[in-house]
Image (cartoon, grey):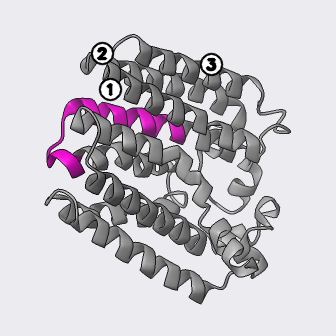
Amino acid sequence: MNKITAHLSNIALYHTIFALPFAYMGAFLAANGLPSLHDFIFITLSMIGARSSAMVLDNLIDLKYDSLQPRLSKRPMVTGAVKPREVKFILLLSLLLFFFSASQLAPVCIYLVPLAVFVLVIYPYTKRFTFLCHFVLGSALAMAPIGSYIAITNTLNLTIVILGLGVCLWIGGFDAIYGSQDEIFDKTHHLHSLATEFTAKKVFPIIAGVHFISILCFIFVGLSYQLPLIYYAGVTIAIITLIYQHSIVSSTDYSRLTQTYFMRNGIVSIVIFIFTVISILFK
Protein backbone atom coordinates (compact mmCIF):
# COMPACT_ATOMS: atom_id res chain seq x y z
CA MET A 1 0.00 0.00 0.00
CA ASN A 2 2.87 2.40 0.78
CA LYS A 3 4.27 1.80 -2.72
CA ILE A 4 0.90 2.59 -4.31
CA THR A 5 0.60 5.74 -2.20
CA ALA A 6 4.10 6.80 -3.25
CA HIS A 7 3.27 6.39 -6.94
CA LEU A 8 0.01 8.29 -6.57
CA SER A 9 1.93 11.06 -4.85
CA ASN A 10 4.55 11.01 -7.60
CA ILE A 11 1.98 11.62 -10.33
CA ALA A 12 0.08 14.06 -8.08
CA LEU A 13 -3.28 12.70 -9.21
CA TYR A 14 -5.10 15.30 -7.10
CA HIS A 15 -3.65 18.02 -9.35
CA THR A 16 -6.14 16.84 -11.97
CA ILE A 17 -8.48 19.30 -10.29
CA PHE A 18 -6.83 22.08 -12.31
CA ALA A 19 -7.33 20.72 -15.82
CA LEU A 20 -10.15 18.15 -15.68
CA PRO A 21 -12.99 20.65 -15.00
CA PHE A 22 -11.88 22.70 -17.99
CA ALA A 23 -11.73 19.52 -20.10
CA TYR A 24 -15.33 18.83 -19.13
CA MET A 25 -16.22 22.46 -19.82
CA GLY A 26 -14.90 22.09 -23.36
CA ALA A 27 -16.96 18.92 -23.76
CA PHE A 28 -20.20 20.54 -22.58
CA LEU A 29 -19.64 23.54 -24.83
CA ALA A 30 -18.92 21.24 -27.79
CA ALA A 31 -22.06 19.19 -27.18
CA ASN A 32 -24.14 22.26 -26.24
CA GLY A 33 -25.45 20.08 -23.46
CA LEU A 34 -24.58 16.70 -22.01
CA PRO A 35 -21.77 14.96 -23.91
CA SER A 36 -22.34 11.28 -24.63
CA LEU A 37 -21.26 8.80 -21.96
CA HIS A 38 -18.76 7.36 -24.45
CA ASP A 39 -17.09 10.73 -25.04
CA PHE A 40 -17.19 11.59 -21.33
CA ILE A 41 -15.44 8.36 -20.35
CA PHE A 42 -12.71 8.54 -22.97
CA ILE A 43 -12.07 12.25 -22.41
CA THR A 44 -11.61 11.43 -18.72
CA LEU A 45 -9.25 8.53 -19.49
CA SER A 46 -7.31 10.69 -21.95
CA MET A 47 -6.87 13.32 -19.26
CA ILE A 48 -5.68 10.75 -16.73
CA GLY A 49 -3.20 9.31 -19.21
CA ALA A 50 -1.89 12.69 -20.34
CA ARG A 51 -1.72 14.14 -16.82
CA SER A 52 0.08 11.09 -15.41
CA SER A 53 2.53 11.11 -18.32
CA ALA A 54 3.24 14.80 -17.76
CA MET A 55 3.99 14.39 -14.06
CA VAL A 56 6.17 11.33 -14.59
CA LEU A 57 8.16 13.08 -17.31
CA ASP A 58 8.57 16.20 -15.19
CA ASN A 59 9.79 14.22 -12.18
CA LEU A 60 12.16 12.10 -14.25
CA ILE A 61 13.67 14.97 -16.21
CA ASP A 62 13.99 17.26 -13.19
CA LEU A 63 15.21 14.65 -10.68
CA LYS A 64 18.74 16.09 -10.78
CA TYR A 65 17.50 19.49 -9.61
CA ASP A 66 14.72 18.23 -7.33
CA SER A 67 17.33 16.26 -5.36
CA LEU A 68 19.19 19.50 -4.66
CA GLN A 69 16.13 21.53 -3.72
CA PRO A 70 15.36 21.35 0.06
CA ARG A 71 11.73 22.29 -0.56
CA LEU A 72 11.26 19.14 -2.65
CA SER A 73 13.17 16.74 -0.39
CA LYS A 74 10.07 14.65 0.41
CA ARG A 75 9.10 13.89 -3.18
CA PRO A 76 8.90 10.09 -3.71
CA MET A 77 11.59 10.00 -6.40
CA VAL A 78 13.92 12.15 -4.29
CA THR A 79 13.52 9.96 -1.21
CA GLY A 80 13.86 6.79 -3.26
CA ALA A 81 10.36 5.56 -2.38
CA VAL A 82 9.75 5.40 -6.13
CA LYS A 83 12.47 4.04 -8.43
CA PRO A 84 13.17 5.45 -11.93
CA ARG A 85 12.53 2.04 -13.56
CA GLU A 86 9.12 1.87 -11.88
CA VAL A 87 8.31 5.38 -13.04
CA LYS A 88 9.28 4.54 -16.62
CA PHE A 89 6.83 1.64 -16.53
CA ILE A 90 4.09 3.96 -15.27
CA LEU A 91 5.01 6.38 -18.06
CA LEU A 92 4.58 3.65 -20.67
CA LEU A 93 1.18 2.65 -19.27
CA SER A 94 0.07 6.29 -19.12
CA LEU A 95 1.07 6.97 -22.71
CA LEU A 96 -0.68 3.81 -23.89
CA LEU A 97 -3.84 4.89 -22.05
CA PHE A 98 -3.57 8.34 -23.63
CA PHE A 99 -3.12 6.95 -27.16
CA PHE A 100 -5.88 4.37 -26.81
CA SER A 101 -8.38 6.83 -25.32
CA ALA A 102 -7.65 9.42 -28.02
CA SER A 103 -8.24 6.76 -30.69
CA GLN A 104 -11.78 6.30 -29.35
CA LEU A 105 -12.68 9.96 -29.88
CA ALA A 106 -12.97 12.13 -33.00
CA PRO A 107 -10.71 10.85 -35.82
CA VAL A 108 -8.36 13.83 -35.73
CA CYS A 109 -7.48 13.24 -32.06
CA ILE A 110 -5.08 10.36 -32.62
CA TYR A 111 -3.09 12.53 -35.04
CA LEU A 112 -2.83 15.30 -32.45
CA VAL A 113 -1.52 13.04 -29.68
CA PRO A 114 2.16 13.38 -30.77
CA LEU A 115 1.81 17.18 -30.62
CA ALA A 116 0.37 16.93 -27.11
CA VAL A 117 3.15 14.57 -26.00
CA PHE A 118 5.75 16.95 -27.45
CA VAL A 119 4.44 19.76 -25.23
CA LEU A 120 4.53 17.46 -22.19
CA VAL A 121 8.11 16.42 -22.93
CA ILE A 122 9.46 19.87 -23.75
CA TYR A 123 8.02 21.64 -20.68
CA PRO A 124 10.57 20.37 -18.10
CA TYR A 125 13.41 21.43 -20.39
CA THR A 126 12.10 24.96 -20.97
CA LYS A 127 13.22 26.11 -17.53
CA ARG A 128 16.75 25.48 -18.76
CA PHE A 129 16.50 28.21 -21.39
CA THR A 130 13.46 30.51 -21.03
CA PHE A 131 11.66 32.45 -18.33
CA LEU A 132 8.40 31.72 -20.18
CA CYS A 133 8.51 28.11 -18.93
CA HIS A 134 5.48 28.78 -16.70
CA PHE A 135 3.32 29.43 -19.74
CA VAL A 136 4.54 26.31 -21.51
CA LEU A 137 3.10 24.49 -18.50
CA GLY A 138 -0.02 26.61 -18.94
CA SER A 139 -0.16 25.56 -22.59
CA ALA A 140 -0.14 21.92 -21.54
CA LEU A 141 -3.21 22.50 -19.38
CA ALA A 142 -4.81 24.66 -22.08
CA MET A 143 -4.97 21.52 -24.20
CA ALA A 144 -7.66 20.20 -21.84
CA PRO A 145 -10.64 22.30 -23.03
CA ILE A 146 -9.29 22.56 -26.57
CA GLY A 147 -8.71 18.82 -26.83
CA SER A 148 -12.13 17.98 -25.41
CA TYR A 149 -13.84 20.30 -27.86
CA ILE A 150 -11.97 18.72 -30.78
CA ALA A 151 -12.69 15.23 -29.39
CA ILE A 152 -16.43 15.80 -29.82
CA THR A 153 -16.70 18.12 -32.82
CA ASN A 154 -13.59 17.12 -34.82
CA THR A 155 -13.16 20.88 -35.36
CA LEU A 156 -11.89 23.96 -33.51
CA ASN A 157 -13.11 27.53 -33.12
CA LEU A 158 -11.69 30.81 -31.88
CA THR A 159 -13.73 30.88 -28.67
CA ILE A 160 -12.30 27.59 -27.45
CA VAL A 161 -8.80 28.81 -28.27
CA ILE A 162 -9.53 31.90 -26.14
CA LEU A 163 -10.75 29.60 -23.35
CA GLY A 164 -7.48 27.69 -23.64
CA LEU A 165 -5.57 30.97 -23.46
CA GLY A 166 -7.43 31.85 -20.25
CA VAL A 167 -6.46 28.49 -18.75
CA CYS A 168 -2.84 28.95 -19.87
CA LEU A 169 -2.54 32.38 -18.26
CA TRP A 170 -4.37 31.34 -15.09
CA ILE A 171 -2.23 28.30 -14.28
CA GLY A 172 0.97 29.72 -15.76
CA GLY A 173 0.55 32.78 -13.57
CA PHE A 174 0.27 30.80 -10.38
CA ASP A 175 3.18 28.60 -11.39
CA ALA A 176 5.25 31.79 -11.75
CA ILE A 177 4.19 32.92 -8.26
CA TYR A 178 4.92 29.50 -6.79
CA GLY A 179 8.30 29.40 -8.52
CA SER A 180 9.30 32.90 -7.45
CA GLN A 181 10.27 31.58 -4.01
CA ASP A 182 13.05 29.62 -5.75
CA GLU A 183 14.69 32.68 -7.30
CA ILE A 184 18.05 32.19 -5.57
CA PHE A 185 18.11 28.42 -6.15
CA ASP A 186 17.25 28.86 -9.83
CA LYS A 187 19.92 31.50 -10.36
CA THR A 188 22.50 29.32 -8.63
CA HIS A 189 21.72 26.38 -10.90
CA HIS A 190 21.28 28.43 -14.07
CA LEU A 191 17.56 27.74 -14.33
CA HIS A 192 15.11 30.26 -15.74
CA SER A 193 11.86 31.67 -14.42
CA LEU A 194 9.94 34.91 -14.36
CA ALA A 195 11.63 35.64 -11.03
CA THR A 196 15.16 35.12 -12.35
CA GLU A 197 14.38 37.40 -15.28
CA PHE A 198 12.56 40.23 -13.47
CA THR A 199 13.08 39.46 -9.72
CA ALA A 200 10.49 37.90 -7.44
CA LYS A 201 9.26 41.34 -6.37
CA LYS A 202 8.16 42.18 -9.91
CA VAL A 203 6.54 38.80 -10.50
CA PHE A 204 3.49 39.64 -8.42
CA PRO A 205 2.31 42.76 -10.31
CA ILE A 206 3.12 41.06 -13.62
CA ILE A 207 0.98 38.05 -12.73
CA ALA A 208 -1.82 40.29 -11.45
CA GLY A 209 -2.01 41.63 -15.00
CA VAL A 210 -1.77 38.12 -16.46
CA HIS A 211 -4.65 36.94 -14.29
CA PHE A 212 -6.71 39.98 -15.27
CA ILE A 213 -6.33 38.94 -18.92
CA SER A 214 -7.28 35.35 -18.05
CA ILE A 215 -10.54 36.60 -16.53
CA LEU A 216 -11.23 38.61 -19.67
CA CYS A 217 -10.81 35.37 -21.63
CA PHE A 218 -13.40 33.60 -19.46
CA ILE A 219 -15.79 36.54 -19.87
CA PHE A 220 -15.27 36.43 -23.65
CA VAL A 221 -16.29 32.74 -23.68
CA GLY A 222 -19.55 33.58 -21.91
CA LEU A 223 -20.32 36.41 -24.30
CA SER A 224 -19.40 34.37 -27.37
CA TYR A 225 -21.67 31.48 -26.38
CA GLN A 226 -24.34 33.86 -25.13
CA LEU A 227 -24.40 32.14 -21.76
CA PRO A 228 -26.91 33.51 -19.22
CA LEU A 229 -26.00 35.71 -16.29
CA ILE A 230 -25.58 32.75 -13.95
CA TYR A 231 -22.34 31.89 -15.78
CA TYR A 232 -20.84 35.17 -14.61
CA ALA A 233 -21.55 34.22 -10.99
CA GLY A 234 -18.92 31.53 -11.48
CA VAL A 235 -16.54 34.03 -13.04
CA THR A 236 -17.16 36.37 -10.09
CA ILE A 237 -16.25 33.64 -7.60
CA ALA A 238 -13.11 32.99 -9.66
CA ILE A 239 -12.21 36.70 -9.50
CA ILE A 240 -12.69 36.76 -5.71
CA THR A 241 -10.51 33.65 -5.40
CA LEU A 242 -7.74 35.20 -7.49
CA ILE A 243 -7.84 38.45 -5.51
CA TYR A 244 -7.65 36.54 -2.23
CA GLN A 245 -4.78 34.35 -3.46
CA HIS A 246 -2.81 37.42 -4.50
CA SER A 247 -3.50 39.17 -1.21
CA ILE A 248 -2.01 36.54 1.10
CA VAL A 249 1.45 36.09 -0.46
CA SER A 250 4.22 38.45 -1.50
CA SER A 251 7.88 38.36 -2.42
CA THR A 252 8.69 39.09 1.23
CA ASP A 253 6.28 36.57 2.79
CA TYR A 254 5.82 33.07 1.38
CA SER A 255 4.59 31.62 4.68
CA ARG A 256 1.10 31.01 3.27
CA LEU A 257 2.34 29.58 -0.02
CA THR A 258 1.45 26.08 1.15
CA GLN A 259 -0.16 23.03 -0.44
CA THR A 260 -3.50 24.45 0.69
CA TYR A 261 -2.76 27.65 -1.21
CA PHE A 262 -1.80 25.63 -4.27
CA MET A 263 -4.96 23.49 -4.21
CA ARG A 264 -7.20 26.49 -3.54
CA ASN A 265 -6.47 27.64 -7.08
CA GLY A 266 -8.64 24.73 -8.18
CA ILE A 267 -11.69 26.73 -7.08
CA VAL A 268 -11.32 28.71 -10.31
CA SER A 269 -11.61 25.67 -12.59
CA ILE A 270 -14.38 24.06 -10.53
CA VAL A 271 -16.70 27.05 -10.27
CA ILE A 272 -16.31 28.11 -13.90
CA PHE A 273 -17.09 24.55 -14.99
CA ILE A 274 -20.09 24.18 -12.64
CA PHE A 275 -21.64 27.47 -13.69
CA THR A 276 -21.00 26.68 -17.34
CA VAL A 277 -22.95 23.43 -16.96
CA ILE A 278 -25.78 25.23 -15.18
CA SER A 279 -25.81 27.87 -17.91
CA ILE A 280 -25.96 25.32 -20.73
CA LEU A 281 -28.46 22.90 -19.19
CA PHE A 282 -30.89 25.45 -17.79
CA LYS A 283 -30.78 28.35 -20.26
In magenta, the rendered stretch is 150-171
Labels 3 and 1: the sequence-earlier one: 3
Q: Is residue 143 left or right of residue 57?
A: left
Circle 1 Cα neighbour tier, 10 Å, few/some/many (<14 / 14–19 / ≥20): few
Q: Which residue is mark 2?
A: 223
Q: Position of residue 87 (x, y in %)?
A: 57, 81
Q: Is residue 91 left or right of residue 202?
A: left
Please say whether residue 256 is one of the residues in the magenta stretch: no
| Eye-nearest disc, 3 or 1 | 1
Q: Are marks 3 and 1 in contact (CB under 8 Å)?
A: no
Element on which disc 1 rests: helix
Q: Is residue 258 above or below residue 59?
A: above
Query: Residue at (30%, 17%) from the top-left corner?
Result: 283
* Amino acid marked by disc 2: Leu
Q: Position of residue 137 (x, y in %)?
A: 48, 51
Element on which disc 2 rests: helix
Q: Is residue 106 above or below residue 36?
A: below
Q: Which residue is mark 3?
A: 240
* Amino acid marked by disc 3: Ile
Element on which disc 3 rests: helix
Q: CA distance from mark 2 to mark 3?
A: 20 Å
Kindly identify which numbered label has been placed on residue 227: none
Magenta span: helix, strand or loop, mainly? Answer: helix
Q: Nearer the viewer, residue 85 or 238?
A: 238
Kindly identify which numbered label has been placed on residue 281: 1
